[in-house]
Image (spheres, rainbow, N blue to C red):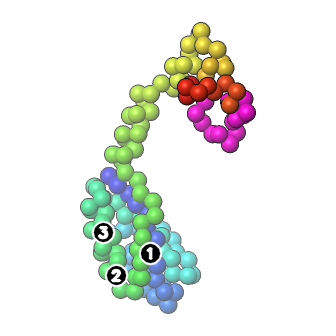
């Protein structure tokens, strides 16, 4: 199952008409709008193809200037990521080794917060 949020844009003078059309079109769920003509809706589908068909229906509503997907959620994608996390070690194996010295642990994270001067002193020409 996929679900996507969409921002629909219309001119303010057509706002109420477009909101009513969206509420009655049976392909989306209306959530909110503002006075500038921006309308927030969501669509659901078994896959991307079904969502795109529903998006075409929304784009064909009179006075809709644009309908753009903003966020998308895919149950399949989430399941795949959760499976990777479930099968991963919570703590990297190197941190569980009793004989390793802290200064031998290589950090590959955020260089903005890393002591690069100390790093340069321990880095040799072989790349280790």
Secondary structure at badge 1 equals strand
Please provide percent x and percent y for residue 45: 30, 59
Marks 1 and 2 sit apart, C-alpha to C-alpha, by 10 Å
Residue 26: image x %, image y %?
Answer: 32, 71
Horizontal placement of 54 versus 112: left or right?
left
Residue 30: tell me if it is visible.
no
Identify which residue is drawn at 56% across, 13% down.
97
Marks 1 and 3, the one that precedes in the sequence: 1
Q: Mark 3: which secondary structure?
A: helix
- Whether residue 25 sits left or right of residue 16 in the image: it is left
x and y percent of residue 3 in the render?
A: 38, 57
Residue receiving disc 1 = 8
Which quadrant holds residue 118?
top right
- Which label's residue is closer to the chain start, 1 or 2? 1
Which residue occupies 36% across, 68% down?
28
Q: Is residue 82 above or below residue 99?
A: below
Q: Residue furthest bottom?
A: 13
Q: Quadrant of residue 20?
A: bottom left
Closer to us: 119 or 34: 119
Residue 61: mark in rendering: 2
- Mark 3 lies on residue: 54
Which label is found at residue 101? none
**Span colored in magenta:** 107-119
Seen at 59% across and 10% down, the residue is: 98
Residue 47 lies in the magenta-colored region: no
* Cβ atoms at labels 3 and 2 below 8 Å apart: no
Image quadrant in which the C terminus is located: top right
Question: How many dots with numbers?
Answer: 3
Mark 1 → mark 3, Cα distance in angstroms? 13 Å
User: Which class describes the residues within 10 Å of circle 2: few (<14), some (14-19), or many (20+)?
Assistant: some
């Amino acid at each position: 199952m996929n679900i996507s949020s969409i921002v629909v844009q219309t001119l303010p003078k057509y706002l109420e008409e477009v909101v009513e059309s969206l509420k009655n079109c049976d392909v989306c769920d209306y959530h909110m709008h503002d006075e500038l003509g921006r309308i927030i809706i969501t669509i659901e589908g078994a896959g991307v193809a079904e969502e795109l068909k529903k998006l075409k229906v929304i784009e064909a509503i009179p006075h809709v200037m644009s309908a753009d997907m903003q966020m998308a959620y895919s149950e399949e994608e989430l399941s795949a990521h959760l499976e990777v996390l479930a099968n991963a070690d919570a703590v990297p194996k190197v941190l569980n080794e009793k004989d390793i010295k802290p200064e031998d642990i290589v950090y590959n994270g955020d260089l903005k917060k890393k002591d690069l001067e100390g790093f340069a002193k321990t880095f040799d020409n072989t790349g280790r």
